[in-house]
Image (cartoon, rainbow, N blue to C red):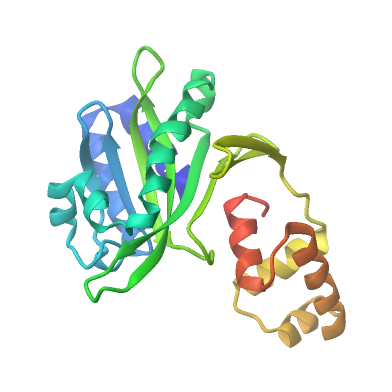
Amino acid sequence: MNEIINSLWKDSHSKGKNVSKQYLEVLKVLARSSFGCIYIVDLKKEKIEFISQNPYLFSGLKSVEVEKLGYNFYRQYTKTEDLEILRKVNTSGFKFFECLPAEEKTSHTITYDFHIKNTNNIDVLINHKLTPIELCEEGNISKIVCVVSYSLKRTAGNIRIVSETSDVLWHYNLSTGKWQEEFKVSLKPREREIIRLYLRGLTIEEIAEELFVSASTVKFHRSKLFEKIGVNNITEAISYVVENKLI
């Protein structure tokens, strides 16, 4: 979704303000057709410029209420133990972006997970994916888009920076305070097929029938995939593959 938003934004700025309004309407449609939420922040003005409606991802608040609170929303509703994650994203995360050439900044996304307090006092683990969409003349980030969704992880943290144009990703170690370079895992064709079929909601038996193999063969490839990317179940595998743009 980040790529779609980014292309819409660039197109709107190349064609004028009328298209900007159209692009905002398209964002609203995208938000309604997904389980997530989208918002745009003007960093220079420290203001939320646009936010789609999804109270479940914002502690039960309506978009206008979140927009009014601005940054204070996360100060008030983030689980206390997870506030440090947000601080690290705002410091180390944006310092990482400052080191990138201007032309590469909008192709990188920082993703992380943290808990927010819901209206019924239950902590909900959500995921944020932040992508720069506009730079000022000096090459600094002036606007970002954030895609909010329910996290598929088990714990908070998981601060990573990925790029659609690079085979390298970066993982932030909260204990050491340092970024660690990793290479994206390369999936075999069969592993990609199995993930795509899981995304369609097929069972192991249905996947086996689709691929003209036995169920035990599907299980074998699945276990090898789990081992390769370091996950324990298909939900974690799908999350990893999608987040790291492996399919």
- Look at 53% across and 33% down and name the residue there: 107
Q: Which of the pair 153/167 is nearer the observer? A: 153
Image coordinates of residue 161 in percent, x first then y, are 55, 40
Image coordinates of residue 51 in percent, x first then y, are 24, 50
Image coordinates of residue 185 in percent, x first then y, are 75, 49
Q: Is residue 62 above or below residue 43?
A: below
- Position of the C terminus, as image quadrant, is bottom right
Whether residue 218 sits left or right of residue 73 in the image: it is right
Asked if residue 229 can be seen in this view, the reply is yes
Q: Which of the pair 11/145 is nearer the observer? A: 145
In which image quadrant can residue 182 be found?
Answer: top right
Whether residue 64 sits left or right of residue 46 in the image: it is left
In which image quadrant can residue 89 be found?
Answer: top left
Q: Is residue 42 above or below residue 240?
A: above
Image coordinates of residue 230 in percent, x first then y, are 73, 60
Q: Is residue 171 above or below residue 62?
A: above
Whether residue 41 sits left or right of residue 81 in the image: it is left
- Look at 37% across and 12% down and name the residue there: 138
- Look at 70% across and 38% down and name the residue there: 167
- Look at 17% across and 62% down and name the residue there: 62
Whether residue 93 sits left or right of residue 199 in the image: it is left
Q: Which of the pair 70/24 is nearer the observer? A: 70
Q: Which of the pair 3/135 is nearer the observer? A: 135
